[in-house]
Amino acid sequence: MQGDSMSAKNTGVMKRLAFIKHLYNLGVEQSRKVEPLCYVSILTFHDAVELFLQLVAEYLDVKKRIKEIHFMEYWDLINHRLKEKGKSELTQKMAMERLNKARVAFKHYGTPPSKSAIEDFRVNVTRFFEENTDIVFNIKFAEISLIELVTYKNVYDNLKVACQLLEENKIEDSLDKIALAFAQLIDGFEDRKRDEYGRSPFFFGGEFTFLSSFFMHVTGDLGRFVDKVREAIEALQRAVKILSLGLDYKKYTRFRLLTPTVMRTVNGKYHIVRVKRGQKGTAAKEDVQFCIDFVIESALILQEYDF
């Protein structure tokens, strides 16, 4: 990124763009739900677009107080500044006017949008961000990521590498980095909460690595019983830890199915054991992106309550 984009990144604009993209992604997710659950997407889409317009107005130093600008006024004010800088004008004005009218009708008069209208708004809002982010900030909308909001350096670094590997279509390598990032996130958060005696408030029982029928040299029904008890206790330990950290357990279960197992030895080194796909098949890019988003979401939750 060159020119204005570097300036944007240095002044914290990238973080605001990342949050705006987060809102946009929420809107996309909401828009794909059944009626009436999809209706709320137009409110989310509108909020994302309006926050973007406010950011652009500040970034270009529009000579009018933000709170005095009505939604549809942004185009003329911003286009005037863009013209002075020799840049193209903002696009999708008419489409965003339709979105604004639909939002007013729904929010203030209780008139819900049709499912087909919501589909159109999703397409139009996507075009709005893809076209105008590049025009104003010289940044591709696809390059903006909530990773910029992650403050844990090792997690941030591994997620950045995972994104690059995903772009190169190296699915398994990307999943390795994502799994490592999540393990470092959880372990790092817990390690920072240990007391003077090394005890963690998120400790829910010791390791069962060597308490299997194989290591205990038991066979038959007793061996199967030992292994089932071990598996049950380990599953409970993982579940309670995830829930105690405030993370989304349903998303975590999908994440676990997609990512390899990460083992941490006593010397602090991590080892990755890849998943045998079998009937599950190869993970798709959408699956990998879900895993990246889950780690980011988890990091933001832990950052909020870090102490």
Image: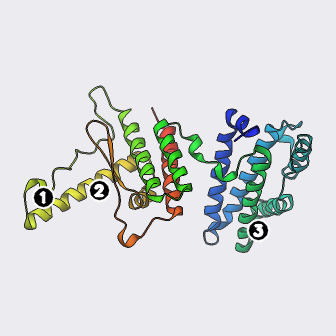
For the residues labelled 3 and 1, the Cα–Cα distance comes to 63 Å
Q: Residue at x 33, y 37 (%)?
A: 201
Check disc 2 and report its element: helix, strand or loop: helix
| Towards the viewer: 254 or 68 | 254
Q: Quadrant of the N terminus?
A: top right
195 sits to left or right of 62 = left
Q: Which of the two discs, 3 and 1, labels the residue nearer the N terminus? A: 3
Foreground tag (3 vs 1): 1
Residue at image mark 3? 111
Residue 253: image quadrant is bottom left
Residue at image mark 2? 235
What's under tag 2, amino acid-wise?
Ala
- The disc placed on residue 196 is none
Foreground tag (1 vs 2): 1
Q: Is the residue 15 above or below the residue 209 in the image?
A: above
Q: Quadrant of the C terminus?
A: top left
Q: Which of the two discs, 2 and 3, labels the residue nearer the N terminus? A: 3
Q: Residue at x 14, y 63 (%)?
A: 225
Q: Tell me if I can see residue 148 in this picture.
A: yes
Dot 1 and dot 2 residues touching (CB under 8 Å): no
What's under tag 3, amino acid-wise?
Thr
203 sits to left or right of 43 = left
Residue at image mark 1? 213
148 sits to left or right of 89 = left
Q: Is the residue 219 above or below the residue 10 in the image?
A: below
Q: Tell me if I can see residue 112 in this picture.
A: no
